[in-house]
Structure formats: structure tokens, C-alpha cells
């Protein structure tokens, strides 16, 4: 395969699943000898991109303002100057700008156009741009079904399911119980000490992640005889979320579990957190497109308990059916948590959702587009 130049478009490179996937594909391209360019407003992940051999152009293509339209000619010039073979859009506003820029180029020099549907966005004309790709990557079967339902005009042959994946070297299977991992967690957060079960809910400080339901579950476990259970919520403490954190801590006080709760910033040792926990919670009230936390935790060997909808439900059905609970059913959540803590299910023997598979699937798609034009 000849050397390709692939340009990825997204709003910024701060943190998140979209940003992580962008870097993962850029790294895979560079290792195969291709040129990987990312266009965004920048952020803390720019340096890791550069360290991996990728290139970055700072352009604020994600700001919802009419002024953002001025970047379309800049993108068109960029695609022409670098000889872009493929332009890959990962977010709606950058996709609109990129699509218009690509379409305005001469047909003979026009790069192939790829989009990835990373989320279950509100259907409509604005979101429909994410289904405009010559190939439309769906990050799960849940997303593919969503696209088919809301955008039936998209030909089936343009849809390609390439699930997100985890690095099995970074999330290697651990023996359980992993007492060394638990000791490390307690050393970092002494309030997690104790011989009771440790529940872990990693996620940003947003109401959608289900922190309140996790607190209610903890209170239910205490009332059911697990009075020494603890709950750790890494990622909850972040700038701008102070009011939400105070609201949750007030709820913990009312539920009389405040002494058993630790809220912290996101941890840089999430694999160790999974290894030291007894149960990982995935309680997002809004169906997620994929649910990487599920795969990461199960790869390490920690059981997962989550709402049976969206990508989380899809993953649990495949990898650990015992962890799926009807969304919003708190009595069922408590009962299932007790069952999983009493008799943890055997971890899945095979994790198909790997980083290597995701990277190879995406590069194969690029190659197909270049070789066949579709």
C-alpha cells in the first residue's frame, strides 16, 4: 500500500473517547509509514500526538459561531497542499466544514471522505452530516442500529461497524483478589481502607454518569448488611463542577454514607483501580455509544454492573450477561450487586474489542477506499 496522507478533524484535543480514538489511529498510521495530520483547536493531547509522529494544525473548527465558517477555505487549501488522500471527520461542526471543503475541490484531486458516528446524537439535519461519509464508521452495533433507524437513506454498504477497543497490554488480566492493587488505592485514598467491598464508578462530573444512583446503591448495600462497603468515584472532581459535587456530597450525608464515599479527580492508574475494586459501575442514564469502561474492567478481571441499554448493554450481553440490569430499576440493581459481590462471575476468556483490532479495521477501511473508491 502506498504512503497515505490522512487528515482527521475534531473540535479539540483535551480528553475523551473521540480524542483518544483520534490519537490511536494517528499512531497506527505513523507506524505503517503513513502521514497523520490532525486539525483541531488544540489541547493537552497535542503533545502525545506529536510524540507519536503525528502532525497538528491549530484551527478552531468546533466553535459554534458563524465566524467558524471562515475556516472552510483554509481547510480546502490544507487538503490540497498536503495532498490529502483521506479526510476523516469525527464531530458534527468540523464535519460540515470538512465536507464543504472537500466538495469544493476538483474531482480529480478530491480526497476520500470518511465519518465516524461516535455518539447517539439527536437525529436531524445537523447530525446527519456524520452519515455523509463514503464510509461511515459506527463504533458499535448499537450505533449502527441507531443510524439505520434515523437515517434509512444511508446505503447499508456504506456502514462499517468498527468497535472501539482497549489495549490488552495496558489492561492485562490480574489475579483476584489483587491485594497489592487495593493497598495502592488505599495509600492514595486512605478513606477507602477497610475489609468491605469496594465499588468503583469512573466518569466525568456530569449528572448523566449516574453518581446519585451509585450513592443510593451504596446506601442500599449498607442497609442490607454490607455496612463496610466503600464507593470511589474518580473523575467526579473537576473544574467547573463544584456545585454538582456539593449536591452529591449532600445526598451522601442524607443517605448516611458520606464516610464511605471518596470523590476525586480522574486517576492516571485506572487499570490498577479496576484491579483493586470488587465491582465496577456503569450507570449512565443516557445510552452510551460504546462503553469502554466495561471492556477495560472485564479485561482486567473485575465484574461490571450496569444499565442494560446502549453500548453498555450490548457489551454486557456479549461479555458478562449477569451484570446487566433494566435501566432505572434500583431494587434490581441492589439485588444484582449483592449477587455479583457474593459470587463474582468468571471473567470472559476472550476480549474481542481490542485496540489492535480497531486500528487494523480502520486502516483496512482506508485502504479499501483508496483502492476501490468506495
Image (cartoon, rainbow, N blue to C red):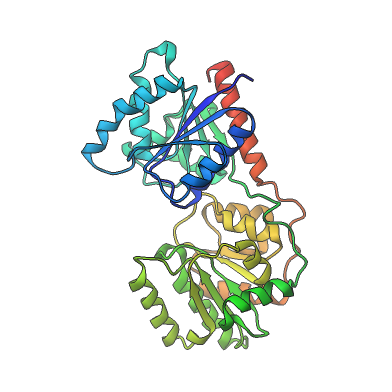
The answer to whether residue 369 is left or right of residue 355 is left
Q: Is residue 344 above or below residue 123?
A: below
Residue 63 as seen in the image, left or right of residue 304: left
Vertical relation: 175 (above or below) 195: above
The percent coordinates of residue 132 (x first, y second) are 42, 29
- Which residue appears at 65% of the width and 35% of the height? 360
Nearest to the observer: residue 175 or residue 352 = 175
Image location of residue 6, percent across then percent down: 50, 28
Q: Is residue 89 above or below residue 254?
A: above
User: In the picture, residue 111 is in which quadrant?
Assistant: top left
The residue closer to the viewer here, 138 or 367, is 367
Numbered label tally: 0
Can you say which quadrant of the picture contains the N terminus?
Answer: top right
Q: Position of residue 176 (x, y in %)?
A: 76, 69
Q: Could you say which is closer to the camera, residue 104 or residue 24? A: 24
Write the residue at 27% across / 43% down. Answer: 64
Residue lying at 32% horizontally and 27% vertically, measured from the top left: 74
Specify the farthest residue to the left: 66
**Left or right of 193 in this view: 251:** left
Q: Position of residue 288 (x, y in %)?
A: 49, 53
The answer to whether residue 294 is visible is: yes
Dividing the picture into quadrants, the one containing residue 293 is bottom right
Amino acid at each position: 500500500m502506498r504512503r497515505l496522507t490522512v487528515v482527521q478533524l475534531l473540535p479539540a484535543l483535551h480528553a475523551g473517547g473521540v480524542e483518544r480514538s483520534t490519537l490511536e489511529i494517528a499512531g497506527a498510521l505513523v507506524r505503517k509509514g503513513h502521514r497523520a495530520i490532525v486539525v483541531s483547536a488544540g489541547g493537552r493531547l497535542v503533545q502525545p500526538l506529536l510524540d507519536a509522529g503525528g502532525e497538528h494544525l491549530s484551527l478552531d473548527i468546533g466553535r459554534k459561531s458563524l465566524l467558524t465558517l471562515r475556516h472552510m477555505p483554509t481547510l480546502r487549501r490544507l487538503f490540497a497542499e498536503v495532498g490529502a488522500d483521506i479526510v476523516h471527520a469525527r464531530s458534527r461542526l468540523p464535519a460540515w466544514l470538512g465536507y464543504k471543503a472537500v466538495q469544493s475541490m476538483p474531482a480529480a484531486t478530491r480526497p476520500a471522505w470518511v465519518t465516524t458516528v461516535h455518539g447517539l446524537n439527536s437525529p436531524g439535519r445537523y447530525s446527519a452530516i456524520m452519515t455523509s461519509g463514503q464510509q461511515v464508521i459506527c463504533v458499535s452495533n448499537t450505533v449502527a442500529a441507531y443510524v439505520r433507524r434515523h437515517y434509512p437513506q444511508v446505503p447499508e454498504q456504506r456502514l462499517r461497524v468498527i468497535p472501539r477497543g482497549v489495549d490488552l497490554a495496558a489492561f492485562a488480566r490480574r489475579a483476584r483478589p489483587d491485594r497489592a492493587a487495593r493497598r495502592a488505592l488505599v495509600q492514595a485514598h486512605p478513606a477507602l481502607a477497610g475489609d468491605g467491598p469496594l465499588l468503583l464508578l469512573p466518569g466525568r462530573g456530569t449528572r448523566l454518569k449516574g453518581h446519585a444512583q451509585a450513592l443510593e446503591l451504596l446506601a442500599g448495600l449498607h442497609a442490607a448488611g454490607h455496612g463496610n462497603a466503600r464507593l470511589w468515584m474518580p473523575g467526579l472532581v473537576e473544574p467547573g463542577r463544584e456545585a454538582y459535587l456539593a449536591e452529591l456530597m449532600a445526598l451522601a450525608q442524607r443517605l448516611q454514607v458520606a464516610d464511605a464515599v471518596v470523590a476525586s479527580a480522574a486517576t492516571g492508574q485506572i487499570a490498577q483501580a479496576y484491579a483493586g475494586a470488587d465491582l465496577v459501575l456503569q450507570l449512565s442514564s443516557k445510552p452510551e455509544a460504546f462503553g469502554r469502561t466495561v471492556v477495560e474492567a472485564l479485561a482486567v478481571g473485575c465484574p461490571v454492573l450496569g444499565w442494560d441499554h446502549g453500548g453498555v448493554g450490548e457489551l454486557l450481553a456479549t461479555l458478562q450477561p449477569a451484570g446487566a440490569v433494566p435501566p432505572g430499576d434500583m431494587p434490581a440493581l441492589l439485588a444484582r450487586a449483592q449477587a455479583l459481590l457474593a459470587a463474582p462471575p468468571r471473567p470472559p476468556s476472550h476480549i474481542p474489542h481490542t485496540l489492535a483490532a480497531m486500528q487494523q479495521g480502520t486502516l483496512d477501511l482506508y485502504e479499501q477506499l483508496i483502492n476501490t473508491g468506495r
